[in-house]
Amino acid sequence: MTHTIQPNNPEVTPAPDATDVPAFTASAPKPAAAAVPAALKRRIPKYSDLAPLMQFKKPEFSKEARLKRASTIWDLRDMAKRRTPQAPFDYTDGAAEGEITLRRAREAFLDIEFRPGILRNVSSIDLSTDILDKPSRLPVGIAPTGFTRMMQSEGEYAGSQAAEAAGIPYTLSTMGTASIEDVAAAAPNGRNWFQLYLWTDRDRSLELIERAAKAGNDTLMVTVDTAVAGARLRDVRNGMTIPPALTVKTVLDASYRPAWWFNFLTHEPLTFASLSRYTGTVADLINSMFDPTLTFEDLDWLRETWKGKLVVKGIQTVDDARKVVAHGADGVVLSNHGGRQLDRAPIPFHLLPGVKEAFTKDNSDAAIMLDTGIMSGADIIAALALGADFTLIGRAYLYGLMAGGRAGVDRTLQILEKDMARTMALLGVSKISELTPDHVRLLTK
């Protein structure tokens, strides 16, 4: 006779065989009810039990307390939006046309899977690295941003001083609202870089280059993705001008953000510190002053003129990354201008592996930097794992600036540093050099 044996489910108690069931009669005693554990018996709480729970804290409304409550860059963004008029907030927060590029850039960092290693000694995490032959305490620097004092009156001074305190590079924009010399004086021990837009007037460009060198800037970052201005529709709809215009709409908006307007009206008027006084829209300024005829020959001229490190920002293809290095660049910034120029542009994070592979094949030691879409320390670690040498933040730092001035920028960097250290520890790495592409997998949809 064949016997069929059914597999057992270890989570189900098998029914007893009928022959094993004891016979109960009416006179048989019933099982006693289980005793209720003492911990589950209700009782009136004692004061000694409640006292440790009643630790009411006095409400704190200071800027420091408010910023301390921010746990993410998104928290700082929420604070910034509440404290900043719509036009300057949108100038920071917005991008070109349908803002598809910016959305995709942020999604790119979400569409990954970290692959952690276990049983590694991560009791000490070292986030320091070298970039362009000099040390940086963190693998992130502050990207160039234009008209920064419009977002909050401390502007470039807050950014450069926070970067100096954190031991990371700070990049001043040609369209900044503090001069090269003033930033150098505000952060004399910081590592200051200067970002250059080449103009149709080469003499003006040369003057800026000479001033940057004299002020101690060791790196020149030339931006090459602004042949014409992008269609930044939020700015158009807000009537964004330089300086901000006092219209009925802006006055009404100001009534909800009195601190911003008080700072704006009681400090030096906003101007582009490296340009002549200008009134009009940002797009009109770009289209009138920046040179749409730039070629690689102009990069050759710049390489001959500038004796420090030369970085090209705005690289969006592998071929262009290789070409600018062949023309003398010491590094590239994979960037689509934060999505503010060409909508549907390539995403730097997606471009990164191809550029890294190409530079490896070329035996090139040119630095690969990346910006656009970074909103957490985990984003930075993912970029480093896929081949970036360094990263830059723009909006993330400006959200902190708008949320609380210099203290807000400090908080931005504190949040990112904590994020990075935690992510590395959970990945099982203790140094930046230990990160590899094996730690990150790009998910496919």
Image: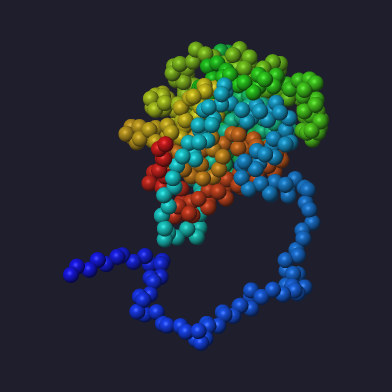
Residue 43's place in the image compared with 174, above or below, is below
Q: Quarter-wise, where is residue 181 in the image?
A: top right
The one nearer the camera, 105 or 3, is 3
Q: Position of residue 173 (x, y in %)?
A: 60, 27
Residue lying furthest front in this view?
A: 26
Q: By what rule are the colours in the image chosen?
A: rainbow
Q: Relative to 26, is 148 on the left or the right?
A: right
Residue shown at 65%/22% (left/top)? 235
Residue shown at 47%/17% (left/top)? 298
Quarter of the image where the C terminus is located? top left
Q: Position of residue 144 (x, y in %)?
A: 59, 30
Residue 55's place in the image compared with 167, above or below, is below
Q: Relative to 285, is 223 on the left or the right?
A: left
The one nearer the camera, 226 or 326, is 226
Residue 182 shows up from this direction: no
Quarter of the image where the N terminus is located? bottom left
Q: Position of residue 124 (x, y in %)?
A: 50, 58
Q: Quarter-wise, where is residue 288 in the image?
A: top right
Q: Position of residue 136 (x, y in %)?
A: 53, 43
Q: How many marks?
A: 0
Residue 373's place in the image compared with 91, above or below, is below
Residue 250 shows up from this direction: yes
Residue shown at 64%/35% (left/top)? 398
Q: Quarter-wise, where is residue 178 in the image?
A: top right
The one nearer the camera, 74 or 212, is 74
Q: Relative to 155, is 224 on the left or the right?
A: left
Residue shown at 49%/24% (left/top)? 344
Residue lying furthest left in this view?
A: 1
